[in-house]
Image: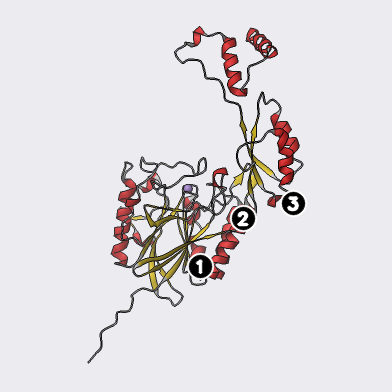
Amino acid sequence: MLGPVRLLPTYGVIRLLHTADWHLGATLQGWSREAEHRAALAQLVAIARERAVDAVVVAGDVFDSLNPSADAQRLLYDTLRDLRAACPHARIALVAGNHDPAARLEAPRALFEMADVMSIGAFARRDGAFDARAHLSPIRDASGRIGAHLLALPYPRAADLPVTNEGAVRETYREAVESARREIGTAPLIVTGHLHVLGALESEGSERRILIGGEHAVPSDIFPTDVAYVALGHLHRSQWVGRETIRYSGSLIPMSKTEIDYAHGVSIVEIDDAGVVAIEHAAFNRVVPHLRVPSRGALSITQLDSALEALALNASAPIEAWPFAHLAIKVDGPAVGLKAELDAICEKFPLRVVSTSVERPQAQAPAPASLRLAERKPSDLFRDAYEQAHGVAPTDDHFNCFERLLQEA
Ligand SMILES: [Mn+2]
């Protein structure tokens, strides 16, 4: 008599490296970020090799601009070559984000296919319907067994959406996942998205606001619950939203002052036939420090020199390794000539000042709004404007200058 039939799992365990928002070619106040990008991508490749991943998914914003520089393009191709060497069997997939030149990301497809790299710039349609086959790819483990399928979907541009009202993205994802299911049945499914999902944390002044089908952000329940993992791009902070398996991996490097404290890295996700079994965020080491001076609050310009001295910066480092600095300076009067003073101090140190915020004493309350402009004297308006800008009243000399200008005008 036969023993109980042991059901072998239909699908093996696969390991995914999820990354996004590379923004290759980005600059900070005109400074190149290439040294940081190269260092982060070298760590990404090393992690992919060590963890023997079966797939590498870049969820949009590969490039920072619609017209990426030759250096930025070279960095992408160098990285794909290194990834291919590090993980010979892995599925590598790029999808376009809102920053990417979608058509140009697809242009090298003939060569990409030779390297088994999938590149998706736009939603493919056939006879008016979503063409799931153009977006689907099996993910195999090292033995060649299929462990999951990838449905690679780019940032939905207006032209990609069937309609442009609220709910268009939900409808797009519903149609995409349903057509994928017709191809792959109930197998574990990984879906990408380059979207702002409601409830996730933005980085102030960093990610460009996007408007998709009349919405800035979409609810997390647009991703059907039978999707094992949603690999998101667009927001630069590593986080999950809605449920743990809907994740932003975060960007490679800090793109703005608000991202200094993030642990930038990649997400490593293990999936078996029942779904996600493990998610881990692997953080990078930063090669270029991003500093706030002072670390909190603000200092006066007379304290700046010693504060920078105390950082004990390495003057023999190459310029691309110099720290980026964000200064917060407090002033208690007119700050005329502040910029020149700052420059004179900072240029003695091996650091790159990328922003300066100036804190002024509390400005006096503006005149009541009920007062009509015609009822106010120009000199009063000048005094108010000066006080708001500098935190102190103008002197007689200032008033005299203003009156002279007024006569000339
Ligand atoms: Mn984006």
Ligand 1 closer than 8 Å to label 1 CB: no
Q: What amino acid type should be assigned to the residue bearing mark 3?
A: Asn
199 up-or-down from 85: above or below:
above
Within 10 Å of disc 2 (Cα), the crowding (few <14, some 14-19, many 20+) is some
> Where does the image place residue 125, in percent across and percent down from the top left?
35, 54
Residue underneath mark 1:
114
Q: CA distance from mark 3 to mark 1?
A: 45 Å
CB under 8 Å between discs 3 and 2: no
Q: CA distance from mark 2 to mark 1?
A: 33 Å
Image position of 70 (left or right of 234): right
The front one of 400 and 31 is: 400
Identified by mark 1, the residue type is Met
Identified at 77% across, 52% down, the residue is: 316
Question: Residue 306: percent from the left, percent from the top?
Answer: 74, 40
> Can I make out residue 76 in this image?
yes
Q: Residue 64's spot in the image, x, y percent?
A: 54, 48
Question: Mark 2 — residue?
Answer: 286
